[in-house]
Amino acid sequence: MREIGMLQGMRLCRQYKRLNNEERKKVRNRRLAELVSWAKEQSPVYKELYKDVGQNYSLTDLPPVNKTQLMSQFNQWITDRSLTLSGVEKFMENPDNIGRKFRNKYLVFTTSGSTGNPLVALCDKTTNNMMSAINTLRSFARKEDMKAFVLRGGKSIGVFATGGFYLSNNSIRARQLAMPWKKKKFAVTSALLPVEKIVEQLNQFQPVMLGGYPSNLELLIDEQKSGRLHISPAIIMTGGEYLSGKVRKELAQAFGCYVQTSYSCTEGGTIACECTEHHFHINDDWLIVEPVDKDNKPVPDGAQADKILLTNLFNYTQPFIRYEVTDRVVMHHELCSCGNSLPWLTLEGRTDDVVHFVQDGKEIKIPPLAIYAILKEVHSLRRFQVIVYSENKIELRLEPSEGISRETAFVQTREALLSFLASHKVNAVNILLSDELPKQHPGSGKFKHIIYNGE
């Protein structure tokens, strides 16, 4: 396995854009063959999975994998045979290790635990360099926004979930530790804070780039219009949730700047970058995206998939080869009018609701990911759904972890939720345990963790 530096990664990304379709296909096939060969040699899990795969295979000959399957065999999955899940978990017990490298070699990231099986991801130097190279070259949809960001000092702040080894939080902390002389250039504020605290921190920092979950940034629109928040970013970059046209327009009007988003995940970094047509162009030199149905059968261009199978071509420590990601997408190969020749996606996106409470005659809005971030840390829960009604009534649909009663899960969930709401000065709430389990919408098939039925 050959290590790739960031500058080399940027050069490879530029070279790929100049190739024709046939040349690009050869590059992807070569990188896939090298990854599969390495995985078969170094990972007992893939050695077993691919024991019947011959030399002349195609991508679809490789069996798909999923998070539950791989995490249950973590020690046999990782190609660095000296690593163990218990060792990584021990490292993560100390919050001071956020942003630091495990064994001075691997950044550690975790995904959410809403399915009862959070992913633990290890990113070696090549993986981190390639994620940085892709973002540096391709994250800005417009050149003028990149120019303005640089000329105005390059200060950026994100409104994200903090306190854990999450992709955004851990990445920013790692940059602060690696480049302490740039400590005042990038920061993160907690999406779990009351909006007035977030406003206070943003006013103090005065970012040139503002990032965050759309539902959190939506709450800042009125703050900016009222003058309580007074910042003038050159660009707003959202992520982690679906960015609706309505919220995009309102953010642009309130802050007077361009607003864009991206499609990312912990397992692959930035899968696709948004262009000026609001299409998500896949970084397919390093990430292979296969839209499939619920049975992992290919879905044609123009049709909505039930999920994707993702292959990460730069992570050799922890191979993700045809890895299941439960996002519903539509694939396009027709030329985009923006001029970018890479294939592109349209996304269904996550659609959890901003919830509204009333306390002492005052309306208090709370973004869904703040509630989600709190409840996913309740270890007695395997899955949950929160429905908020008028008059501060909350219904909890809970699926407990194995060996835990629903009543025990409810008590712990209620305690965590009450404590969080109190931090937002919401004290008069009525929380009830539903007889129903978490469920998808009967019409659309969409699943929401946080639902607002107050109107």
Image: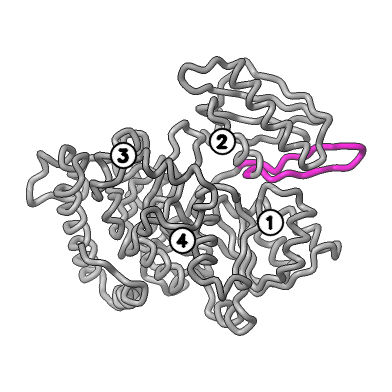
Q: Is residue 32 magenta?
A: no
| Residue 390 visible in the shown view | yes
Quarter of the image where the N terminus is located: bottom left
| Extreme residue in the bottom direction | 151
Query: How far apart in space, not on screen, are marks 2 and 1 (Cα)?
Result: 21 Å
Quick check: is 355 in the magenta stretch?
yes
Residue ID for mark 2: 376
Quick check: 293 left or right of 99? left
Q: Where does residue 329 sit, x and y in percent of width and height?
A: 44, 49
Which label number is shown at residue 217? 1
Tag 3 residue:
74
Amino acid beneath label 3: Phe
How many C-alpha atoms fall within 10 Å of the one at disc 2: few (<14), some, or many (≥20)? many
420 vs 35, left or right, is: right
For residue 246, above or below residue 369: below
Amino acid residing under circle 4:
Phe
Q: Give the residues in magenta.
A: 352-369
- Classify 85 as above or below 106: above
Q: Which mark is first along the chain, 3 or 1? A: 3
- Residue 334 in sight here: no
